[in-house]
Amino acid sequence: MTDTVAEARAARPRIHHPLPPASWPTRAEATRSRWFSPLRLGRSVVARERTWVPAMVPWRATDDGFVTPDVLDWYARFAAGQPGVLVVEATGIRDIRSGPLLRIGDDRFIPGLEELVRVVRDRSGARTRLFIQIIDFLTVRRRPSPARYFADYLEVTPTLRRRLADALADPRWLDAGEADVRACLARGERPLVEAALGARELEALDRGYRERVWDLDLPHIRELPRALPGLFADAARRAFRAGFDGTELHYAHAYTMASFLSRRNVRGDGYGLTREGRVRLPLEVLAQVRARVPEDHVVGIRYLGDEAIAGGSDVDDAAWFGVRFAAGGADYLSISKGGSFEDARPPRIGEAVYPYTGRSGYECMPTVFSDERGPFGRNVPLAAAVRRAVRAAGFETPVVTSGGIGTFDQAEGILARAEADAVAAARQTLADPDWFAKIRRGDGHLVRRCQFTNYCEGLDQRHKQVTCKLWDRDFSPGDPSVRMSADGARRLVAPPWRAP
Ligand SMILES: Cc1cc2nc3c(=O)[nH]c(=O)nc-3n(C[C@H](O)[C@H](O)[C@H](O)COP(=O)(O)O)c2cc1C
Ligand code: SF4
């Protein structure tokens, strides 16, 4: 175990929190409630309710990023509960291979996305506003075996030779053959490897190579400010053409745009270092996106209320960014937390680092095994702080909160205290996509409550089709109406529910 992982674990007491008690409203109470009241988003889109399903990657696209029947089933199942807003998973803006993640980096993806829009519209009875989250991410490679790393990946530079020569107190390493240098390191003890390799080289060995937005020596990274506004704008335009009500810019978690916003962003070309520098590209992207879609197409931003990593952005940054995004024309701000690569657990050899395994990952998808504060509504204060700053600056931009929310009382309390304008629930909606419908009907006691133990997140981590441990196995094997996950473990969508 590395020091950082050990520290993170020691700093996180494991108190097992029970689910919060739930008292469900009658149908009339639900109808009158804040959570089930309309919310205006942007110029003319009105969500019929403030119930919200944030983006969740289910690993159901083709390897080429196309919508599949399983993608359609996944979103149709959420649409059946008729949430006010449903946000489609992080969808790649580039036309590059990225495994079974949806893509929107070319017009050929539009027909599949159109079909997705149609399915959600039909299944929700046109009650659900459908947005799509669009994302850019940098290269993250799998962790290599040490033998492979020293043989093929490590660059033998003069600096490396100098360090090796110093560590071994032997100047012959300054001009030894490259193969000898590699062999020496491959059989070297760990202290020698640590003395010879720089921090990034060690990281590539122990966790897999990972690009940063401040790697200005890499031409494509240097060019991100020129490339990304157009890529995001083209993607948003396709989302509009496919019929989505809105586009959500993914500026959260471990990905490119969050890294620009990060306090750790040390780009020295005007796109880092200061708050003004860090927000510059995110604002340029927003401006170009806004310019490419009609005014009534909602453009929202999901970003971090707190990076939850050492030296990362905090809630003061988030409040400041929120005001800038509101001024830049964002139609809503959806506040998440954490989910960084920086403190992620080192992956096993052959696997890629997963940004939800460290403390910041915990903060993003908190479980019932928590500290004193517990997981429930843990991130609400961040949204509340952003909202206060945005309102104080004179903007009415709605703010969305999420994280550990699974009861009507929680959601209603958040809205009553004006901590947010919409309340999102990812895992609770995965556990029971009908829970909004049940509450609406006064049948809240029938809600299948999420246990917040992250079976689903474990599947996401292994890029396996995401399912919920609470979905029944109550069907005969081979039942053609039930589609199973590739590993045969569970049904691919929540069991059907018929209103009593
Ligand atoms: C399986 C899974 C996939 C997720 N994928 C995304 C994603 O694509 N984009 C995103 O912004 N958040 C993603 N999240 C985070 C959720 O949107 C949400 O912020 C988080 O789960 C905390 O909310 P909850 O407590 O209601 O689950 C994902 C969460 C889960 C469980
Ligand atoms: S697998 Fe667990 S954490 Fe995930 S949605 Fe189901 S009950 Fe909730």
Image: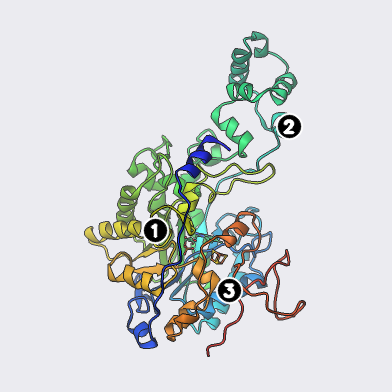
Q: Which mark is residue 233?
A: none
Residue 463 placement: quadrant: bottom right
Query: How many residues crowd around disc 2 within 10 Å: few (fewer than 14), some, or many (20 or more)?
Result: some
Circle 1 residue: 378
The answer, for residue 240, to whether it is visible in the render is no
Q: Amino acid at mark 3?
A: Leu
Label 3: element kind: helix
Question: Taking 51 as reference, is 254 above or below it?
Answer: above
Q: Amino acid at mark 1?
A: Arg
Q: Amino acid at mark 2?
A: Ala
Circle 2 residue: 147
Return the residue found at the far bottom: 500
Residue 42 placement: quadrant: bottom left
Residue at the image position 34 percent from the left and 61 percent from the top: 329
> 62 or 186: nearer the eye?
186
Question: Taking 414 as reference, is 262 above or below it?
Answer: above
Give the quarter of the figure containing the N terminus: top right
Label 2: element kind: helix
Q: Nearer the viewer, mark 1 or mark 3?
A: 1
Q: Position of residue 375 (x, y in %)?
A: 43, 59
Q: Is residue 300 left or right of residue 138?
A: left
CA distance for labels 1 and 2: 43 Å
Q: Along the polypeptide, which appears first: circle 1 or circle 3?
A: 3
Q: Is the C-beta separation of discs 3 and 2 under 8 Å?
A: no
Q: How many marks?
A: 3
Q: Is residue 96 left or right of residue 312?
A: right
